[in-house]
Amino acid sequence: MVEAPTAGEETDMFTTDNRRRIRLAIVSPTPPRPCPVAAHTDELCRVLPSVAPRIGLTVYAIDHGDGQPTAGGRRVDGSIAADDPSAYRRAGQRLRRLGVDVALLEVGPGTAGGPHGRYLLGLTDELTRQGVPYIVAAHHVRRSPLPDDADALSALCRPAAGVVVASNSAGAALVSSRIVPPRRIAVVPPGPPLDLLDPRTTGPLPAALARYGDGPLLTTTGYLSPARGIEVAVAALPGLAATHPGIRYVVAGRTLASRPPRVGDPYRRTVEAAADALGVAHRVIVLDGDLSAADTAALLRATDVYVAPDLDYARTDDRPLADAVGAGLRVVAAAAPYVAELLGDRPDSIVRPGDPAALAAAVERVLKEPAPQPGHRSFAHAAEQIAGLVALVASPRPAPVRRAAAGRRTAA
């Protein structure tokens, strides 16, 4: 697969080959939209100006009606009504008039309107017609996407200058599904956000945890669905409580924003009912909502073991798990190709999916080990790599050399 430029290569691009200022348009859902793609875009807009000051940002939010769109702590430059197909074409025309050099489209399930997000093709058609190159940042790629999803993603990526994914597993899924050839894929692991690595960005533990004990703290964060397997970790608690009487398990996150809002989420009720039936309800703390960056940092710094009991073998990324690994936490995760990629050097941390006893035994093992060192990569490294790719796409290409036509040979 194509490797993204390193930080050093990105610096050379801006200081020698490409001194001019580059205008980059980012098109994505943004806060207050509660989804992982919006969170990634927000972090990128915060970090990119400091790591690549020669890139000027124009942000267009795909607006799902969640409130005033913002990115990187400021209001966006424009918005696209998610369910209006004509709004995507108009946005493409406006971006060209603004003199945008490159567009970065952050895409994932539920990010754009229309069947399988097809309204976004109106934007890419206009960008292609106007001669504006674009890069697709594909989030939450499935190992075997459904045919309609694969068709829509293929149509989106075919004219793109390149496709960015978060893992080799995601890149392999795109290649095996024949959506994108390997030479057009750049793997850019996001790395933990700077707030998580900076000890100055923290706060007290969420108030909901104050009344619980002080034993080992297990944590799972991120958006919830039955595929997360939270009930498997809950079923492991009785065995762990025999040796750790004060053990607690925090589940922090809301149901995926792409699903319609419901009163009394059934999956949460399933988790709470399982905890009650096993007699561990007093050990399970379910925080329904999005934690702030400071609260997330405080929770993870207090965590003894981060648990990812997922039952979804087809996932090719898991941002909360990757953040926990990058921050140097002990982790236990259910086996999957992406988990093996992320935890290849920690085989004792990988367990069989859906096996509470195996999960409990792995938690016992890692609790006896010293905590790993934080990784050397952060989100700033990912932003530098994306900046390098943007500069590469924006750099003028030399005109092809015309060669004299060779004389035709006549067949004998």
Image (cartoon, rainbow, N blue to C red):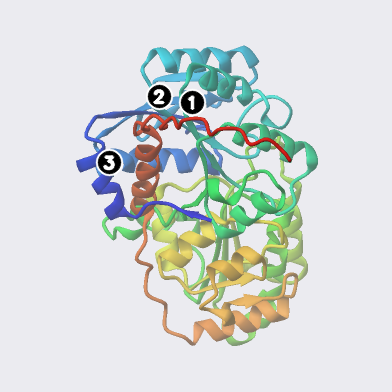
Question: Gap in Å between the C-alphas at discs 3 and 1?
Answer: 21 Å
Residue 118 numbered tag: none
Q: Is residue 126 above or below residue 54?
A: above
Q: CA distance from mark 2 to mark 3?
A: 19 Å
Tag 1: Cα neighbours inside 10 Å, few (<14), some, or many (≥20)? many
Q: Which residue is mark 1?
A: 61
Image position of 143 (left or right of 327): right
Q: Is any atom of residue 136 visible in this view?
A: yes
Q: Is residue 184 left or right of residue 192?
A: right
Type of amino acid at the residue the image marks with label 1: Ala
The amino acid type, in three-letter code, at marker 3 is Ala
Q: CB under 8 Å between callouts 1 and 2?
A: yes
Vertical placement of 262 versus 199: above or below? above
Label 1, label 2: how far apart the Cα atoms are: 7 Å
Q: Nearer the viewer, mark 2 or mark 3?
A: 3
Q: Give the residue type at disc 2.
A: Val
Say which quarter of the image contains residue 228. bottom right
Q: Which residue is mark 3?
A: 52
Residue 303 in the image, given as x and y percentages of width and height: 46, 68
- Find disc 2 in the rendering and name its residue: 76
